[in-house]
Image: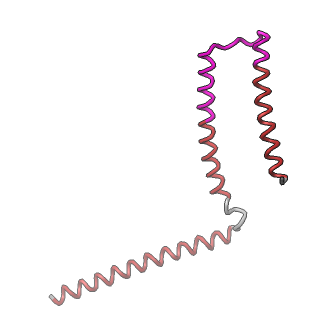
Amino acid sequence: MSMKETRRVSSSVLTVAAIIGIIAAIVLLMSMRILPVPTTVQIISWLISLSSMFFLAVIGGIFVGMYLYHTFSYGEKLDPWEKAVINTEKLVIEIKEKVDKLENEVNKLKELLEDVRRN
């Protein structure tokens, strides 16, 4: 097992242990009558609110992850000059395609004018 995998496993184990510890502390405080024991309706409403917050956090995490990936995916591989060269090449290709299209349109118009002059 590599070092990254070991860290990932240990951090997930610590997270689960922390969650179980928090739940155990809350149950202990309820059994000691320090915290009031919630009703079933309160527990259901807490679960609904927690699940909706979790859902929103997952959706937000997906969007943040996509943003960070697209922002920094080429950042380490290309320096600014290489990016500028690539962008310039893309622009040159686009301009060349547009010029070719315009030349085709001009040739079509010339042919139409010649046909009109003949008739």
Residue 12 position in % (x across, y down): 77, 40
Type of secondary structure dominating the magenta stretch? helix
User: Looking at the image, which residue sits at the far left?
Assistant: 119
Instruction: Please name the residue shown 75% across and 24% down the image.
Output: 23
Task: Name the quadrant containing residue 54.
Answer: top right
Q: Which residues are magenta?
A: 27-54
User: Looking at the image, which residue sits at the far top?
Assistant: 33
Instruction: Please name the residue shown 83% across and 53% down the image.
Output: 1
Above or below 67: residue 111: below
Instruction: Please name the residue shown 67% across and 63% down the image.
Output: 74
Instruction: Please name the residue shown 79% across and 21% down the image.
Output: 25
Residue 58 position in % (x across, y down): 62, 40
Residue 113 inside the magenta-drawn segment: no
Task: Name the quadrant containing residue 104.
Answer: bottom left
Task: Name the quadrant containing residue 39.
Answer: top right
Above or below 89: residue 30: above
